[in-house]
Amino acid sequence: MKFENILAEVNGFGKFQLRTMLLMVIARVTLPFHFLLNNFIAVIPSHHCDVSSLDDGVVFRNLSLAERLLVSIPSQEDGTPNSCQMFAEPQYHLLVNSSNITDLLTVPCQNGWVYDNTDFKSTVVTEWNLVCDKRRVNRATATIFFIGVMVGAAVFGYLSDRFGRKRTLLASYMITTFFGFASAFSYNFAMFAVMRFFTGFGISGISIITVVLCIEWVDIKHRTAVGILMSLDWSISTAVLPVVAYFVNDWRYLTATATSPLFLAMTCWWWLPESARWLISNGELKSAHFYLNKCAELNGRKQFMADLKPESLSTVILVDNEKRKYSYLDLVKTPRMRKLALLTGIVWFVVACTYYGISLNVTGFGVNIYLTQFIYGVIEIPAKAFIYFSLDKIGRRLNQTGTLILTGLCIFCNMFIPQDKGPFRTAVGALGKMFAEAAFTTVFLYTTELYPTVMRQNGLGYSSFMARVGVSVSPLIILLEDVWGHLPSAIFSLVALAGGLAASFLPETNNVRLPETIEDIEQTRRRSISTSEEKSPP
């Protein structure tokens, strides 16, 4: 008897599974809140030099604000005041002839900046003046956070396979909560950067463990549906984030608000189950029987578990050595695992790099930042509907390949749309975001199905690590617009096409039993023919 046979008997998609999903959604709401938080807490509002130092006590103070700016700050080509330069002394002749600015001595801002607080009461930029020469430092805040996510993926992937899904998930809840609130109370940028790193470190565990825990409790028939449903919380929360940010426009309060759902999540953690697959693979048969019994009881199938003894579960998942502890080295010890690790690493890098290349550039399309972010969230919902039907129809591999190539094409096409066509750029960008989200939704489910139970969390941790490398690189690629305006788009397009090619070499997993051991990967796995086959023991 295989684990799928037992799962079919206790109902692989009933009240127990739905409750488990709902309990984890509470914590998963914080994922897009924190992953995309930088779009709002690190936004650069319009600004110009503080010219109060030029006040001579006579003429200057009698001028209007517009006249003070005219005589103090050189104008840019679009007529707005220069953001980083000011005149060394007031140029009163500009009040008569504002075009005569040749050979006028300018200096960097001497007394700080004045910011436009119309949309944002406070951001980390206005708090620590991360503009002009410090602009790159501001961009680095996203990279610092995602480096934390990258390190966390590797650590929590290992810990989850070593100590179990449930206990490791609690640790990630606690770490994210503590450092999330510590970020909000940071008193200088260095402290803020460190706190954001550890927030990313902790939240990475929530990202990868919740998906695996859900998939491991679901039967073959409903894996696709659960994978899509679990990703819907991301899309809905992405659309909710700009609404929250609109009303909570102080960066400290917004950071605290983004973290607060975890208090409820920690309370609900007590009702979460441990993965029965993981427990059996590690020889903890009594605990596995306990959770399977809970599942059967809630799903109305209690009689089956009454007849099933804990000892009989030892034959459900055949492991050569139950005391063996798996590590990331097992990803490269055997030929097919090596190939799998290489390809999934490339695909995750590309999916994340292109997704965040679009997501972190919400100000680059000439439309209100709140509206753009809202559109980016809403557009993901039809992407989920499309993927829901196509995953089972054409399989995981073709979906992964196709969505990545289409993402690259959308980014490429946007290169040729003029900057003044803001709505058109946003529309094509949103279409690219839709395909990028479809690729992300697919890769989570696909990778979970590709790796065996004994290495699933390690595999997903490694893959997520590679994804965060891609995310960390993404803001730095956007900075290349200073070299050539279209260079970031050209790079993202090529990266997406390369990822689509790599995905085409992965094996198909549609309607295939989840592998339990590395041996299952190294040998050809038998495809499940029908649901009825799973219900009858061999």
Image: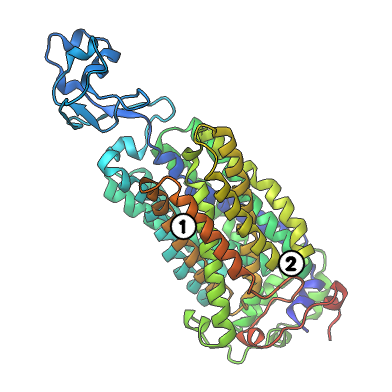
Q: Nearer the viewer, residue 337 or 410?
A: 410
Residue at 48% across, 67% down? 466
Image quadrant assignment for residue 285: bottom right
* Rendered location of residue 431, percent (x, y): 63, 46
Residue at 65% across, 55% down? 438
* Rendered location of residue 110, percent (x, y): 17, 31
Circle 2 packing at 10 Å, graded few (<14), some (14-19), many (20+), is some
Q: Nearer the viewer, residue 229 or 320?
A: 229
Q: Amino acid at mark 1?
A: Val
Please state if 278 lies on the left or on the right of 131 as rendered.
right
Label 2 vs 1, first from the N-terminus: 2
Please state if 514 lies on the left or on the right of 37 as rendered.
right
* Rendered location of residue 189, percent (x, y): 28, 46
Up-down: is 11 above or below 145?
below
Residue 395, which numbered label?
2
Residue 15, which numbered label?
none
Q: Assign the C terminus to one quadrant of the image.
A: bottom right
Q: Give the secondary structure at mark 2.
A: helix
Residue at 29% across, 24% down? 75
Q: Which residue is under mark 1?
A: 471
Q: CA distance from mark 2 to mark 1?
A: 27 Å
Please state if 100 lies on the left or on the right of 125 as rendered.
left
Up-down: is 132 above or below 116?
below
Q: Give the secondary structure at mark 1.
A: helix
* Rendered location of residue 374, percent (x, y): 58, 38
Circle 1 packing at 10 Å, graded few (<14), some (14-19), many (20+), is many
Q: Assign the N terminus to one quadrant of the image.
A: bottom right
Q: Amino acid at mark 2?
A: Gly
